[in-house]
Structures are given as structure tokens and as C-alpha cells.
Image: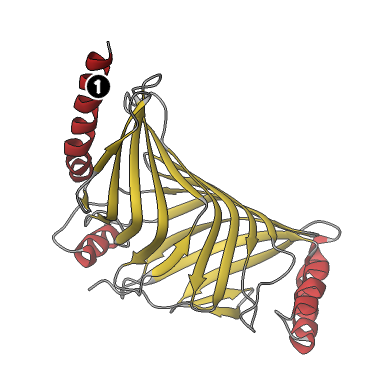
Amino acid sequence: MVIADTVIWAIACRRLDDGARDAAAAAGWSLSADPARWRGWPVAAEIVLPNATLRSGPDIIPPLAWTAGTQTLRLGALHPTCLTISAAGPQSVALADSPPLAFTASRLTATLDLTGADPAVIAATDLNIAAPSGPIRIGSIRLDPRPDGLATLLSTVSLPGSDGQPIQPPIDSLHVVARLSTPVVPMPTAAESAERWRTAGGHLDIDDAALAWGPLAVTGTATLTLDPALQPALTGHLAATGLFAGLDRLVATGALTASGALATRGMLTILAAPSGAGPVILPITVQNSTVSVARIPVLRLVPLRWD
């Protein structure tokens, strides 16, 4: 019996080892890593891929590269059709040719049903991201990929303030549901794929977005596309309650100056007048790498590079 179990385990590990790169290639990705280590006998077939890099193909906009100290693929004996992929150690993600963004996580897993009956789920806890403006910390994140889009839920999000220190208290939750209107057609380069998608009228519809931060609650919808320079262009609307309390909190945390809050409060008072006691409706746009709310620039984005 032990010999038979060992043979079955070895076959399963070999199939995982041989099939990991083929499966990535079939999905339009490339996987590179150091030689795999096998483990898990007798309860599971596991392969550990040291120094793994998963790189997207030309149909992913923008192109993405994810590296991890180790990636582990696991098939349990009790659930042999459920593949779990987990990552550990120092990790990084890079969009297009932007510098890699380093991060760590106490847990990061992707669960895939090999029969296709259930959708994939990606989850992580205790994310620490070394962003250029300061550390970003996320208590938990869940991504639900869909055939034409993605749903995501983040909780306990700590962003850096103007001094680089985390703004306290953290954002309670952030929820986004988005979908592509037009599939991306693979081309020889990412820029060509993006250009073809834009020319075909492609856009990303954000059907539902919600943010909760203490007294501040914001919901919204938006449409994102690419401008002629292949930079993000967005139009949408936000509905917000608790804005004045949110401004007071931003001032208290140092993320907003008192004079800036005073000017913003005056603008919000005008916008809030027609709504009475209801939520304040705010238009939001992204043009020329600048995020504007109610026509007031609030954030400058780093331009995307496609070469």
C-alpha cells in the first residue's frame, strides 16, 4: 500500500511539475523558476518553485510580471481537482515597464477548480507594500476573477500621508466590481494590443465601487478607457455622505491642510445644497494623468509605459 501511494504521489508531482508551465502558457502567461522541489507525501502532491516569475502575455493590459521567493502548487488527496497556488518570501509586481513594487504577505493564495465548476479565488492577508510615497498596508484582500472582469474586496487599508507615515485610522473597506466591454486581442506587443483595444472602442466599466472610512461613505460608477497616448482616461460619478466629517479626519491626520480643507468645504457646501440631506454627487475624471473631483485636481498619476 505504501509503495502504491508513493507511486501515485510521484506521478501527481511529476504532472504538476511538467504541467505548471504548460498551463501558464495555455492561459497566455509564461512561468520561469529554479528546479522544483517535491513534497507533501502522503496527504498531498506539492511542488515548490523557488525564485518564480509569472509574466503576462500581450493580451493583458497593462502587461504584468509577478515574482516570488517561492510559489507552491498543491493538490490534496481529499480534493484532487482543487489546485491551490501559494506564494511566500519577498515578492514584487511590475506593470508595463514601471519599477517593480516590492511587497510581502503573511498569506497569498489562489484556488482553482480544475473541473471549471467553480470560479477562481485569490486571497491575501497582511499585505505590506513598499510604495514610493510610503508603505501601504492591507489587512485582507479578495479577488474574484470573472470571464469579462473582476470583483475585489479590501479591508483595513492603511495609506501613506504627505509625510510618508500611515494615515490613521485605516480605511475600513473598499469594494470594486469591474468588467471589460471588449475582449483584448493578443498582438506582438502590449502597446499594439492596447491600441487595437482602444481603436475597437474598448472600455472598462466599473459597475460598483464602495469605500467606507469611519463617517465617510462613498459609492460610485465609472468608465475607464485609453486616450490616444494609451494613458488612462476615466469619467464617472461618486455619491458621498459624511464628507465634512471625512475632511476633519483628513486634517487631523495631516493628509490635508486646514486651508485646503476650508476651500474644499466651501466647494462641497455649494455641491451639497441641491441634494438636501441626501448624498453629495461628485463628478470624477482622469485626463492627462490627473485625477480631478468636481473639476478640482487631487492626484497626479505616473504615466504608463508600454515599451
Percent position of residue 224, x then y? 44, 61
Q: The C terminus lies in which quarter of the figure? A: bottom left
Q: The N terminus lies in which quarter of the figure? A: top left
* Quadrant assignment, res 36: top left
Residue drawn at x 32%, y 62% is: 62
Number of disc labels = 1
Q: Residues within 10 Å of mark 1 (few under 14, many from 20)?
A: few
Residue in front for this viewpoint, 26 or 74: 74
Q: Image check: 125 left or right of 15? A: right
Q: Image check: 292 left or right of 213? A: left
Most extreme residue toward the top is: 1
**SS at circle 1:** helix
Residue drawn at x 26%, y 37% is: 38
Percent position of residue 147, x then y? 36, 39
Residue drawn at x 78%, y 67% is: 243
**Vertical position of residue 136 compared to residue 55: above or below:** below
**Vertical position of residue 238 compared to residue 302: above or below:** above
**Vertical position of residue 179 compared to residue 276: above or below:** above
Percent position of residue 261, x then y? 77, 81
The residue indicated by pointer 1 is 6
Residue in front for this viewpoint, 206 or 66: 66
Percent position of residue 278, x then y? 81, 56
Q: Amino acid at mark 1?
A: Thr
Most extreme residue toward the left is: 188
Residue drawn at x 24%, y 65% is: 195
Residue in front for this viewpoint, 43 or 62: 43
* Quadrant assignment, res 305: bottom left
Q: Image check: 266 left or right of 203? A: right
Q: Image check: 121 left or right of 280? A: left
